[in-house]
Image (cartoon, rainbow, N blue to C red):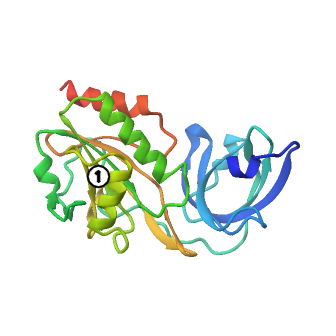
Amino acid sequence: MVLLAAGALQAKTLHVDGIVVALDPLTRTMLVAHRPIGNTMPAMTMPFRVENREDLADLHPGIRIEFDLVVSRNRSVARRIRRTGEPDVPIPPPKGQRNIGEQLPDFNLLDQNGHPVRLSDLRGRVVALNFLYTRCPLPDVCPRLAANFATLRKRVGPGVVFVSITVDPEFDTPPVLAEYARRWSATTPGWLFLTGDVSKAAAALGEVYWTDEGSIGHNSTTSVISRDGKLAARVDGSTWRVEQLQRLIEKELEK
């Protein structure tokens, strides 16, 4: 959005069409996998703020839409959201998705050092877990999620382990994740970057991801897992505040 608005002195309107991936009515935001926006932006998945919350009422993941993106110097908003008439793209809720308070299934992945890690190995500690990938082109998605974890590591106690699972496991091998970990100063224990068959963990935690027009789209769920392996809290998207997740983590630490 900042790139679109940079240097703009007057509002301009751009036509956008794409597929709804996820919705957040509370923040009037929709995550859309869109086609190229004129000569301004390539195809990618990104969040858009909607001017009128009511426009989200008839939308659902998988629906094909088009809208006017009104860009000014200080903000951009989506207006006149309408269906394109093209068939929906199936984006069903993950099978096996757990609800808050339910036990999570175990998983077996590899960390950035090539060591096997199971969720059950982390019992006794509160876990903060997100999904990202190293080639993510959107600074407000994966890099922001990683930066938030880097900040939280400095704020919470040693009873917390941070886990970042890639949604691009074919590219994000342990050596690639090790380099990414160094980028975020995560070379000390306490922050694991995991790869492998991530489908089981993703489904249980409500993470939806797919490849579309050469990039990977995902809905960026972040979860807090209790010491006994139950889902304690979940926040969606990448726009949550550090303080928000910090409170959820500290609540679990107090138990």
Asked if one can make out residue 88 in the rendered structure from this viewpoint, the answer is yes
Q: Secondary structure at mark 1?
A: loop
State left or right for residue 22 relative to residue 158: right
Q: Residue at x 32, y 31 (%)?
A: 154
The residue singled out by tag 1 in the image is 98
Residue 72 position in % (x across, y down): 80, 43
Q: Rate crowding at label 1 as few (under 14), some (14 to 19) or many (20 or more) other CA atoms within 10 Å.
A: some
Which quadrant holds residue 14?
bottom right
Viewer-nearest residue: 35 or 194? 194
Q: Amino acid at mark 1?
A: Arg
Task: Report the number of discs.
Answer: 1
State left or right for residue 201 relative to residue 144: left
Residue 103 position in % (x across, y down): 19, 48
Viewer-nearest residue: 48 or 203? 48
Vertical side of 200 occupied by 5: above or below: above
Residue 73 position in % (x across, y down): 79, 40
Residue 32 position in % (x across, y down): 60, 59
State left or right for residue 249 relative to residue 21: left
